[in-house]
Image (cartoon, helix red, strand yellow):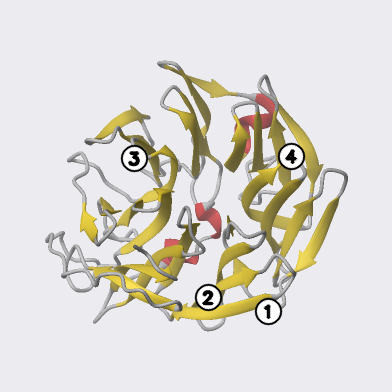
Amino acid sequence: MNRAHRAGATIGSGLAAAALALGASLPAQASSGTGWRVVSSQHYAAANAYNGLLTVVAPRKKDAWALGGTDLSEATAGAPVAEQWNGTGWQAATLPSGLTSEIDAASAPGPKDIWAVSHIGGYVLHWNGTEWSVAKTWPESPFNPEQLTGVTAISPSDVWVFGAPGENAGLGTWHLQRTTWSQVTGTGAGIAEASALSATNIWAVSSTSTSAQADTILNYDGSSWQQVTSLPSLDLTGIVALSATNIWASAQQAYPATGSVLVHYDGQSWQQIAVPWTLNVTGIATDGQGGLWLPAEQVSSGHWYTLHLSGTGTWSRKLLTTAPGEVGSLARIPGSRSVWAVGATPGSTGSDATVWARGAAG
């Protein structure tokens, strides 16, 4: 999800966050219920810190990762955090020391190959099945650090990292091939995030300028990025490629309009489907059954929902949290109809890093 669209980027802004004092509450364990429910709630810092999880990936049924940070308000440098699902519970994981900011996006080609990128802080992390390590760093301006917005990994030696402009300038598009990182110029330089069908068929949402508005959909054919369609009236917030003839993107109406739409490609043409509520949709994920899951915010109230569009075209929504909370992203649990969602829920004065499940999680 492009951080430019995430209201949580300003969660708790103007409030001074206390110094980091690591600690965590005991996680609530998953049950066999069918509706949305909190299965883990953690607080890593002082009571007024705005903790939260921003991205979740599930490479297999009994293995998932939720990542975020200790201070989403960015009032302090904060630190990244990670929680792992081991089939029975969520447990805190150790990340490399000395890192700041929070994890904004992750990609999981396999259970022993997980990639994650910071929001600011200029680093890429890699999980090899045993430990997390720093795979790449960039020097950043101390006064206006550049941001990363997405990562799409094909294998341990084929990884795309994206830094589109948003609330900060972007670090650009980078591609790891074997052991060498190279920067992408030209059409693919402004990508916010992408979804891969294969190493030679990747779909992305991108900005055509230095603005925060992602208004273009691109495709990578194995040799270069090409523009597929331009949607200047929209601000694209996510994309998921299900097949070569089934591509979905989420979008907000470009300012000053309100509301959100889905954009669908059927192999021949692009169509827009209106979201039936006045909500800002901030991402998109498959439900594995021909439908979609979407996190969305009602800006006027600060309420966050999960939306579902079934494969038959039926919409539903569920309120998950109120301000100062957030729903960061969703991921289907492989081999099931169940879903993980991650984000933040209001704490006593700040917010807690939260994982929800819908359906059986074990």
Name the front one of labels 2 and 4: 4
Q: Is residue 127 visible?
A: yes
Res. 348 mark = none
Q: CA distance from mark 4 to mark 3?
A: 42 Å
Name the front one of labels 3 and 1: 1
Give, as a three-letter code, the residue at label 4.
Ala
Res. 244 mark = 4
* Mark 2 neighbour class, 10 Å CA radius: few under 14, some 14 to 19, many 20 or more: many
Tell whether label 2 touches label 1 (CB within 8 Å): yes
Name the side, left or right, on which 292 lies relative to 346: right
Name the residue carrying label 3: 142
The quadrant in which residue 37 appears is: bottom left
Q: Depth check: give the residue in front, 6 or 96.
A: 96
- If you read the primary sequence from the N terminus, does the residue marked by circle 1 or circle 4 appear first? 4
Name the residue carrying label 1: 277
- If you read the primary sequence from the N terminus, does the residue marked by circle 3 or circle 2 appear first? 3
- If you read the primary sequence from the N terminus, does the residue marked by circle 3 or circle 1 appear first? 3
- If you read the primary sequence from the N terminus, does the residue marked by circle 4 or circle 3 appear first? 3
Rendered view: 19 above or below 147: below
Q: CA distance from mark 3 to mark 2?
A: 35 Å
Residue under the image location 52 percent in, 63 percent down: 337
Please provide percent x and percent y for residue 69.
30, 56
* Mark 3 neighbour class, 10 Å CA radius: few under 14, some 14 to 19, many 20 or more: few
Res. 305 mark = 2
Q: Is residue 324 visible?
A: no
